[in-house]
Amino acid sequence: MDVLNAVLLKLTALVLAPFVDLPAQAALIVISVIAGVLAAAAFRYTSNQDALKRVADRVRASMLAMRLFKDDLRSVFRAQMSLFTASGLRLWYSLPPMVVLVIPFVFLLAQMAMWYEFRPLAPGEAALVEVALADASWDTAKIEMIAPDVVSIDAPPVYDPDSRKITWRIRPRAAALDNNPLMLAFAVDNDVVAEKQLVVDAAGGKDALLFVSPMRPSTNFWDRLLYPGEAAFDGDSPIQSISISYGTRVNTICGFEFPWWGTFFIVSILAALALKPVIKVQF
């Protein structure tokens, strides 16, 4: 999984590179359009198009029957049953392309979330750093966080024996040069065994397109899938995961705030529908 995530990270960064000097929403819209076009093409070649066309005709006929025979309850009922059956068949014939698309879309959305779900910290903004330890290390290991000079540790660490987690509160005073991530180091028994990216932006990530990884994950499959930004810890590591409490990014389009994934799905669906006659696909 780490190798796949690393390859996808490089590909995503390569695709987004031309947009770094543009508003962040520009890349989101372009990628959404491309995803919609590819999804329509996949639908075209992996579904039974003839069957979908027959079902679409049946849907239109049933809706027309309900309008023409609205005073005949028996005819309306038959038309409604026909419409219900046709809707079920449409869903059934749509399953193959949905199965084909679900895996690449999950990986794509996980990568996009690293750019659009979270915003970097602003200088002076506090955040929590949470380290989850392996059960065997909780009572025996001495854990220390080593922060760069521009990052203050506001309070002593808080230990939670129930969850086997240690939490620090930090406050960066400045961003790194060229928006590169700062690095937090973690020592176990005085030996540095792990690092975690800390992203700080002078503008708080308001407009810039910046990569933000909120968690360095454990060996858990879902954590590695949903947080692909950094390599996962090994199963025998004394540290199992490290997370930072970044804020949620606000994405504004035409003066309205939308969740980035909502924008992605709406734009990709509209793109697919707009190109429906060009690709000659039946949904």
Image (tube, grey):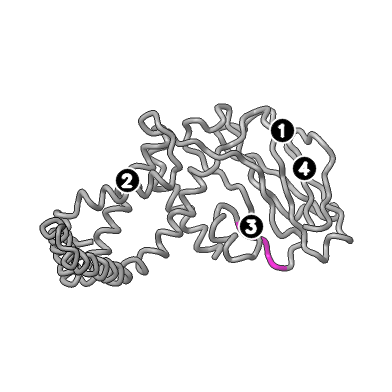
Q: Left or right of 202: which side holds 239?
A: right
Seen at 15% across and 62% down, the residue is: 72
Residue at the farthest left position: 68
Helix, strand or loop at label 4? It is strand
**Which element type, helix, strand or loop, lies under badge 3?**
loop
Magenta stretch: includes residue 184: no
Q: Mark on residue 168?
A: 4
**Which residues make up the magenta segment?**
231-235
Residue 168 position (above or below residue 223): above
Q: Is residue 234 magenta?
A: yes
The circle drawn on residue 267 is: 2
Disc 4 residue crowd, few under 14, some 14–19, many 20+, Cα 10 Å: some
The secondary structure type at the circle numbered 1 is strand
Which residue is painted at 16% across and 59% down in the image? 66
Q: Which residue is mark 1?
A: 171
Left or right relative to 28: residue 272: left
The main secondary structure of the magenta stretch is loop
Q: Residue furthest right?
A: 140
